[in-house]
Amino acid sequence: MAPIRSTGPVLCGLVSVALLAGCSGGDHSSGGRAARPAAGSTSVPPTAATSHSATDPHAPTTVKPPNLAARDIDVVLSGKSLTGQHEYAIPKGIKAGDTLATAVNCKGPGKLIIKLEPMGISFPVMCEKEIVPSLNEAGFAKNRKSASIAFVPSGNVTWSFAAGWDPDPPERDQ
């Protein structure tokens, strides 16, 4: 099984976490991207920058999808102002060696579980009173003709998301 890497954006860098037992983090830096040091949390505490979304047009929001295109990621799915459970088919399935990046902006007390099927991969995103942005990436070792991504919230959570193929994913230990 390919290692999974989970990252949550922070204003000046990214925090990363290996999601599967036996995975380890490795710093990755190229093409103007910030290095991704290993750490122990995928959620970002609210800051002054995340609480001023009404005045800052670049602040994270749930009323529009996160901007993965700014990271040169080909967006294939997105949604905004979502509540309740949602599932989406991943267009054209999955090719071995590809890395799916999923950015989520969530708000409200609760948690959002993101599930990738049929691979059986899932990861939580903890949501808070203020917008919590996160970025999770999953690499795949096998081709899948069909696959889906599901969002399962608990609590009173609203979110937006964008998912796409990362041409320059973080390095993984093999």
Image: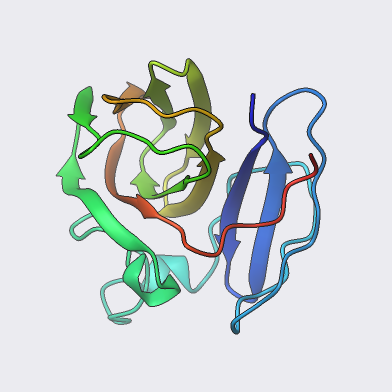
The quadrant holding residue 40 is: top right
Say whether residue 43 is left or right of residue 145: right
Is residue 31 visible in the rendered image? The answer is yes
Residue drawn at 49 percent across, 51 percent down: 134
Residue drawn at 24 percent across, 58 percent down: 65
The correct choice, above or below, for 58 with respect to 45 in the image is: below
The correct choice, above or below, for 131 with respect to 174 in the image is: below
Please give the count of numbered marks on the rendered protein: 0
Residue drawn at 60 percent across, 84 percent down: 32
The quadrant holding residue 92 is: top left
61 and 30: which one is in front?
30
Say whether residue 46 is left or right of residue 38: left
Give residue 39's position: percent from left, percent from top. 79, 49
Quadrant housing the N terminus: top right
Tell me the colour scheme of the image: rainbow
Residue drawn at 42 percent across, 29 percent down: 143
151 and 72: which one is in front?
72
Give residue 54's position: percent from left, percent from top. 26, 73
Is residue 84 visible in the rendered image? The answer is no
Say whether residue 22 is left or right of residue 119: right
Give residue 114's position: percent from left, percent from top. 41, 29
Give residue 136's position: percent from left, percent from top. 52, 45
87 and 22: which one is in front?
22
Quadrant housing the C terminus: top right
